[in-house]
Structures are given as C-alpha cells and as structure tokens.
Image (cartoon, helix red, strand yellow):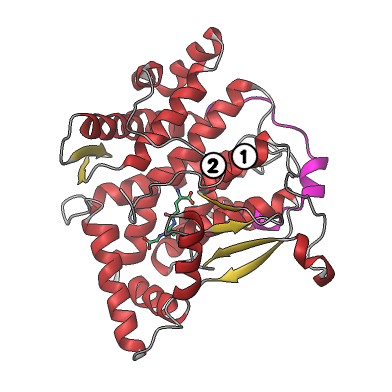
Amino acid sequence: MGERVIDGTGDPRANQTRYRLHGLTLSYFTGKLEAYMRAKGLAYDFVEMDMGDFRRCARATGVAQMPQLETPTGEWLTDTTAIIARFEARNTGLALKPAEPLDAFFSLLLEDYFDEWLWRPALYYRWRFREDARLMSAQIARSLLRDLPGPFWIKRLSILLRQRRVFLTEDGVTSANGAAVEALFLATIDTLEAILAARPYLFGQRPCEADFGLFGSFFRHFSHDPTPHDLMRRRAPNTLAWVTRLWAATPQAIAAAAPIDGAPADLDPLLQEAGASYLPYLAANARALREGGGRVRAEAKGGVFVTKPSRYHVQCLNDLKRAFQSLSEPDRALAAARIGASATLLAEPADEVGVNLTARVARPTDRAWRR
Ligand SMILES: N[C@@H](CCC(=O)N[C@@H](CS)C(=O)NCC(=O)O)C(=O)O
C-alpha cells in the first residue's frame, strides 16, 4: 500500500492516517522536511524528540539522526533527500519536482549543495559565537535532553562542548578558516537577495527541491540564531521574506501558481560555487575512501577544511552522477556550461563505496553518527 495523501491539517479523527514526524523544532533537516510536508499537503503530527524517542527512532531505521518519519502505513523513513525523491517519484501529494529533466537536475544539484555545503556555515554561526551557542545549547538541553536526569547547567554545558567538537573541530573549522566560512554565507545571501527580490521562489513562482534544501539552514539557523539573523536583517530582507513565504505556502496556492519553466540565469553563481568547491570536495572524499586515505582536504572561499572521509557524501556524489548521466547529451552540455569545469566529475562512473538507497532506510550512513 502506498502513502495516503491527506488534505487536512488537524482533524484528530484522522490520527491513524497521518504521518508522524519526529525531530526537534530547532533542527536544520527537521525544518526542511516539515516545510516540504506542509507544501505537499501531507498532514503530520510532530513529535518533539527527547533522548528516549531519539533512540527509539534510531532502532526503527538503524540511523541515529533527525528527522525520522513514520508513514500512515507504519513504515519508517529517514534522510530528507531520499524521502523527497521517493515522494516525488510516487506522485504522493502535490508534485513539486520541475517537469523538465534539466530543471529537475539543477533542482537536485542545488538541494544537495545547500543541504551539505551550507551545513558548515549554519553550524559555525550557531556554535562559534558565545551568545548563539549559549542560547542554542540551552534550547537543546531543555528539549532533547529533557528526559535525562541531572542539573540543567551540566546538560547545557555537555551539549555545548559536544556540538563544538563535532560540528566545528571535526568539520575542519579552525581560527584560520572562519573568515572563509563567513564569506560563503555572505556571498550566498548576496546572490539570493537579488533572486528573491525578483520572484517568490528560486526557480520561479513555485518552490522545488532546491528551495527545501535551502530552507533547512535558513529557517532553523540563519534566520533564527542571533548573529546570522542580524546579518540577514541588514543585508537580506527579501531572503528573510522567502523563509516566511515558504513556511506559509499552502498546496492550494502553489498549485495555482505558474509551473517552473527553466532554471533562471541568476542561479548561476550558486551553480558555479557548487562546481568550484562542493563537487571537488565530493570527488576528493570518494577518492579518500577508495584509496584508504585518512583525511579529505576541501577548499572554499580561500579557506582549507580538513575532515574525515564520509560514506554518506559518496552516496551524494553517486546520486548526482546518476542524475547527470540520465540527462540527454544536449542537456548534459547545457548543465556543464553552467556548473563549470568540475562538471566532468559528474560524468565519471559511480563509486562502489557509497551506500545504496533503499526505500525503508534511505541512506544508512550519515555524517556525525555513522561514517
Ligand atoms: N542527510 C540527513 C541529515 C540529517 C541530520 O544530519 N540531522 C541532524 C540534525 S539537523 C542530526 O540528526 N544531528 C544529530 C547530531 O549529530 O547532533 C537528512 O537529510 O535527513
């Protein structure tokens, strides 16, 4: 049985037919999936995780991460990119994938780029600055850790230290490359500001996968945490308005808007940055795993980031390669012209070391928890 599409928002009698979305109201990927479900018209009950629920979900899918989604038929899904791909492929709810293959490819590339490459700036702004880190460690101690015994201050401090270790140190952030992380964020909002002053969503009048990929970092981090929010208020008011617009979008309003027709040229700085720094990182990561290398070196905006290899990121590259290679020859040439020289990396065969998608447990290795 496939998922039932429910066109409703809160009828308690329909509980057994609603999705259950487990996550945290401060989490990047939880916010991404929530916005997608809202825009699709897929009604869900939100479960604010505590550690007990986090562990229960991890046992159900085999992956300790958030969000996790229970379907009305009792299946468990995880990984927002794979969940979105599955819903779009099965025509569950309102279709949000662009109809033309080249537009659909750009949407997937940008979704993945935003998910993975804005992660570092999002986590940097949250954990690097004292005020932001204090506020957000308190929120995590009060939410996720609420079922653990012990004084609040110990929970807050242990979260703060853990997040700084995992999301700054282990993600290659140092005092030397902080300026490059900030440069990536500032360049991104400057590009977005021009786009979102001109039209409601990245590709036109309707949101697509790329908007949801962008939403995780902007909704839950950049437009929320004090330091990046202040930068956005001053420098990117139209991008702040897009955050609210996408969160408020109804399936009815989206369905009434003109379908996506092309990937506008002003997206090119984003595609080019994906080509300049993200795709070379993905390729270096896959090479490190293939050759047993212990470290991956990436460059972005003049900063150098050294990290442990990630099997999950091999899967990201494999998926992008498959999407690129399924395009027609003329579309591949058009895509390559807009991405730049590193588009050739997408023409190479997929790697063996990735983990194949399955319907149930979408991408079983993930960044911090399983490598
Ligand atoms: N690729 C996954 C990423 C999920 C993910 O990394 N979620 C974060 C929270 S936004 C997480 O579970 N982090 C656990 C931690 O390491 O603190 C997806 O798209 O769902």
Q: Which residue is mark 2?
A: 82
Q: Secondary structure at mark 1?
A: helix
Q: Percent position (x, y) of residue 56?
A: 49, 67
Q: Is 303 inside the magenta-drawn segment? A: no
Q: Is residue 216 above or below residue 23?
A: above
Q: Percent position (x, y) of residue 359?
A: 57, 41
Q: Nearer the viewer, residue 45 or 352?
A: 352
Q: Which mark is residue 67?
A: none
Dividing the picture into quarters, in which one does residue 205 lie? Answer: top right
Q: Percent position (x, y) of residue 109?
A: 49, 32
Q: Is residue 139 above or below residue 363?
A: below
Q: Looking at the image, which residue is at 73% across and 42% down?
A: 92
* Ligand 1 image position (quadrant): bottom left
Task: Report how many numbered discs are placed on residues in the image.
Answer: 2
Q: Nearer the viewer, residue 102 or 85?
A: 85
Q: Are marks 1 and 2 in contact (CB under 8 Å)?
A: yes
Q: Give the amino acid type for the residue marked by disc 1 in the picture.
A: Arg
Task: Report the side of 182 relative to 207 (left or right).
Answer: left
Task: Report the side of 281 relative to 55 (left or right).
Answer: left
The answer to whether residue 11 shows anywhere in this view is yes
Q: Give the amino acid type for the residue marked by disc 2 in the picture.
A: Ala
Q: Nearer the viewer, residue 106 or 40?
A: 40
Q: Residue furthest bottom?
A: 151
Q: Which mark is residue 86?
A: 1
Indicate yes or no: mark 1 CB to ligand 1 under 8 Å. Answer: no
Q: Percent position (x, y) of residue 249?
A: 72, 53
Q: Is 250 inside the magenta-drawn segment? A: yes
Q: Secondary structure at mark 2?
A: helix
Indicate yes or no: mark 2 CB to ligand 1 under 8 Å. Answer: yes
Look at the image and give the residue range highlighted in magenta. Answer: 245-265
